[in-house]
Amino acid sequence: MSDAIKGNILTPGGWVHGAISFGERITDISGQGANPEQNGDDYILPGFIDLHVHGGAGKDVMEGGDAVHKIARLHARHGTTSMLATTMTAPPEDIDVALKGIGEAVRQRGKNEARVLGAHLEGPYINSGKLGAQPNYARSATLAEVQRLETMAPLSVITVAPEIDGHLGLVREMADAGMRVQIGHTLGSYEDGVAAMEHGAAGFTHLFNAMPGLHHREPGMVGAALAHAEYAELIPDLLHVHPGAIKTALRAIPRLYCVTDSTAATGMPDGEYMLGRHVVHKCMGGVRLPDGTLAGSTLTLDQALRNLVGLGLEIADASRRVSTNAADYLGLNDRGRLAPGAWADMVVLDRDLNLKAVYIEGERCDLNDA
């Protein structure tokens, strides 16, 4: 059975004003090239892809069990069609619980849920001097442990502080094994960052946050990213990163993509929530530890898109930053784009960029499903 929807369709070749036909995958796109500003029809964009999700709907990935399913349902209602469930730095037994829950969600997508592609292991292989909101269970990595963890869930992305003893060689081993290694929660220098990229590190975890900043005589890890990175993730909630710094990164890093770093507080009222073993507080749109440290966000990718457009990006460019670039980073050529043969992961937005419909692998989601 094939369905079709009409509007301004963003294809890899540009805008098409016409119809897109699909089952689980896109079968056809018909119409003419157009400037969507010259008509009043809806925008049809690739579904959003979020590679850094800790929680939502009051649930935290570290809870294990069915928490990831509920989180994936919340983010689907905001246009995220695929995602990586993200762990916290924690004792080994906690990480095992989380990964078992992620593994189950990878194997079986529930109704109205974003597709969980795998895990983003954000710690424990980070620098204890740059924890951010991570609990202090940081430790050195070993390939044997990483391989054991991957038996529970696909480790699509692993955050590592490359300056820790033994980590540089491990970055090469993990990259050679097909894992995306990111630099993050680090006190490393510019030189450490360059060396890590030479050893196979592919990106940076929440650029600017939890890493040494840019100084003209000590470029730091941010300098390494701006000078050399093809990919990096960034949180565009306008709290974690100043708009001027976002614009700097957009000019410097060709395939910068956006993540939410969302927590259990996402989609919930102000109050106390869990982030791993930390109690965090949601207030005035932010999430913080009791000492005021930012602790993830309440961002969703539909709001991220609107924030980017508000900063001056064209809709097509903003769409790439919340979808296509993340898919390309993971090596997925059948997600993050509207083209025949790709998964029918789509969002339909009105002229104010508010969501009207979300399709995941051809299935229309119930945006009111809690």
Image: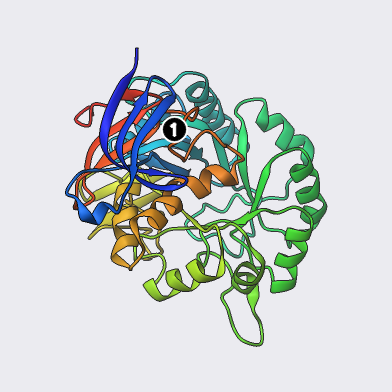
Residue at the (44%, 46%) spot, across then down? 323
Residue at the (77%, 64%) spot, across then down? 195
Is 312 left, or right, of 89 in this rendering? left
How was this image coloured? Answer: rainbow
Is 103 left, or right, of 297 in this rendering? right
Viewer-side residue, 360 vs 139: 360
Mark 1 nearby-residue class (10 Å; few <14, some 14–19, many ≥20): many
> Quarter-wise, where is residue 184 in the image?
bottom right
Three-letter residue code for mark 1: Glu
Give the quarter of the figure containing the C terminus. top left
Would residue 178 be visible to someone looking at this image? Answer: yes
Q: x and y percent of residue 143 in the render?
A: 78, 40
> Quarter-wise, where is residue 321 in the image?
bottom left
Q: x and y percent of residue 236 in the render?
A: 39, 60
> Quarter-wise, where is residue 113 in the image?
top left
Q: Which residue is mark 1?
A: 63
Residue at the (52%, 32%) spot, across then down? 117
